[in-house]
Amino acid sequence: MKYRLGIDIGGTKIAYGIINEDGVIVYRYKTATNINASPADFLQTLAADIDGILRAQAFSREDLIGMALGFPSYVDNEGVIVMSGSMSNLRGFDARGGLSQYFPDIRTIVDNDANIAAIAEHKYGAGRGFDHMLYTAVSTGIGSGFILNGKIYRGAYGGAGESGHMLITPDDGMLCGCDNCGCFMSNASGCMIIGHAAKAIEGGRASVLTEMVGGDLEKLTAAHINQAFQSGDALATELLDRIGYYLGIYIYNFFVSVNTNCYVLGGGMIMNFGDPLMRRIRAAFDRYNHYKGQEVYIKFAELNEDVGIIGACELLI
Ligand SMILES: [Zn+2]
């Protein structure tokens, strides 16, 4: 039996999974991400975890076909982190080169996490049967992966799908890790929506959010905003309207530029806010889309937590 190791690096946790030849995940391990780590420390922790997993498993390294990692970052074709919104210290980190020094005998692939999720959702999830598909994760940040003509599209330098940083309100809004204000992420991502909430409250808006965090706005999370929305809070409702509005425009822009007809949405913000957010996205899209009669599918992702592990292992086939 041969095995593949998939590693899904997120802004809060790193998920490791081993898949066997039958496509079954036979081992899982999860650990917290240190988003402030230097490249050297990050590499060392990653290598120690991988080494520990390989030792814990009763198979030799020869049984491992390879390992593939997804980073929430712009990863170039050489496996170097060009930019990372949620882990800005990793800029310039040669992830593939570094791991190859620790594990010279193991084939290593490094890619963007949304590309990996797009591959998995296209093959096994909500994008099955579509030739053209955009997968977008809306969580702490916003990232996407393109399937064009049935294949992942990476662009000239590997950066295709860094769509959360497309500008929609240039120079207006929160400063993002891309060094610009007013990208889609600065308007509609989980971390930024918290900033918009805090700004409104500091500007005098009344909201149950203030009580929820005992007046300490540093403690605000997207979960608080969801809870406030459920209780009918006006500010939380406006924030959800805002996310839905910008994501609807985001999808419209892709539809008119690339003519993709399947949009698979995943990530914590989509999954936790669920139908109320999806309805707002659809309404914003329909409001601006005048190409009526051409079906456009906006769908929830289907593969949940294992999407990164499954997609990473697909790269090793
Ligand atoms: Zn940005």
Image: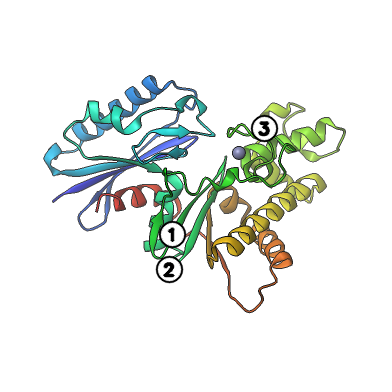
Give the side of residue 124 with respect to residue 54, left or right.
Answer: right
**Is residue 230 among what the camera can see?**
no
Q: Nearer the viewer, residue 228 or 156?
A: 156
Instruction: Measure the C-alpha gap from mark 3 to mark 1.
Output: 29 Å
Disc nearer the start of the sequence (3/1): 1
* Disc 1 residue crowd, few under 14, some 14–19, many 20+, Cα 10 Å: many
Is residue 215 in view from this perspective? yes
The amino acid on which the numbered mark 1 sits, given as a three-letter code, is Ile
Label for residue 3? none
Residue designated by label 1: 147
Numbered circles on residues, count: 3
Task: State which quadrant residue 53 falls in.
Answer: top left
Q: State the SS at label 2.
A: loop
Amino acid type of the residue that numbered disc 3 sits on in the rendered structure: Leu
Q: Residue at x 42, y 59 (%)?
A: 121
Q: Which one is in front, 180 or 63?
A: 180
Residue occupied by mark 2: 131
* Residue 175 image label: 3
